[in-house]
Image (spheres, rainbow, N blue to C red):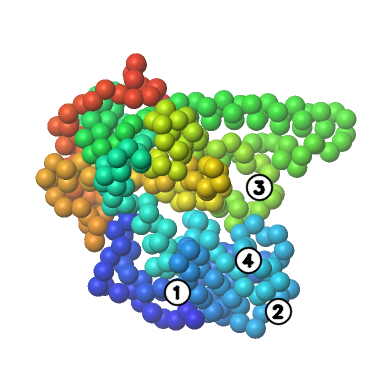
Amino acid sequence: RPGPRGPSTSAMSGFSGAVKLGDLNDFINPSQNCVVALTGDKLDLSAVDVDFQEAGEVILQRRGAPPSDLPPGAPTIYGDPSAPTVKVSLSDCLACSGCVTSAETVLLEAQSADEFRARVRAAAMSGGRMVVVVSVSPQSRASLARAAGLDALDAAKRLTGFFKTMGVARVLDTTASRDLSLLESCEEFVSRYRNAKHAAVTNTPPPSPADVLPVLTSACPGWVCYAEKTHGGAVLNHVSAVKSPQQVMGCIVKRKIAAELGVPASAVFHATVMPCFDKKLEASREDFAMDDLGENVREVDCVLTTGEVAEMIAVAAGLGAPSSGGGDGAGATLDSGELGKGELAAKGAAALALVNPAPLDGALAGAGGGGGGG
């Protein structure tokens, strides 16, 4: 049951330079309510029993609630609809600050610089049976380039050199996946527009409830989760079905790049470098997994923020120790206003200029930089 148990100060979970959580002792603040509703209203956490599962789920059960309290088919409700219990996937908590539990660190620690380093070491000892691929967003590249006083192309070469020195097999840019995402979005809009226009002219319903205008972007995971939790079908029908550039890149890496490297998709550990912390939880959504010979494989295995990569560069340059265990709270971005918030990350960003450059992979191999898109 939830109770007034405060966070312990004995340990810290260092899964991100942007967010530092103490060992929360499975703490849920009973003054907050859960956005996952049993009856259409927020669930009062002072009136529920709470259980934590190793599989990355929090189980909430209203005390004495009849089975009818569970609305069938609710998109964020998991488990048996005939029982007064719901399972809240940790990815459901993306847009909610109502409660934070140490169970969430099971999810978020997999999205950390420590996990990335461990996977790189494992790949190095696998004899080629496992590889690591990194995809860098143009925003992160531009942010690091500005902090280091480099142009975007030079920064890309030095980031490639840094990751390949660690043992990464390919370092790619997400500009190509952004372009693919934009092209698919255009196709989707044209299809919706034609269907909606035909329905208006013939005074008939559109072929699908999703054939409505305007079309709202799905590239921001925070916005998508907010729409899911707060507005439901009225807004979700307007949300684009096109994946974000990050997840499009995940499909490319796990299919095309894996084939080029001669390994199955499950043997590729794909990490992205993104300017937004929410991208970590986007990668963790169950929606973004693919089937590989009967095995469920995530399109993106790990997301590193710009600040985390800058810290990794600083540590490699001997400028400080990793922030796991407290750290100095480097932000996800390295704009001039953020540099002061993370001294180690600021040092690492500047130290990028000292990293030896390497030939570029992928779309940037024969030309210059690219635009934006995560």
Callout 2 crowding tier (Cα within 10 Å): few <14, some 14–19, many ≥20: few
Q: Amino acid at mark 2?
A: Pro
Q: Is residue 64 visible?
A: yes
Which amino acid, by three-letter code, is at mark 1?
Asn
Q: Is residue 116 visible?
A: no
Residue that sits furthest to the left in the current view: 318
Question: Label 3 neighbourhood size at 10 Å, few (<14), some (14-19), many (20+)?
Answer: some
| Label of residue 235 in the image | 3
Gap in angstroms between the C-alphas marked 2 and 3: 30 Å
Residue 130 rendering spot, x and y as whole percentages: 36, 41
Residue 116 point in image, percent of width and height = 31, 47
x, y (%) of residue 312?
23, 45
Element at label 3: helix
Which mark lies nearer to you, 1 or 2?
2
Tell me which label, 1 or 2, sits earlier in the chain.
1
Answer with mark 1 or mark 4, whichever residue precedes in sequence.
1
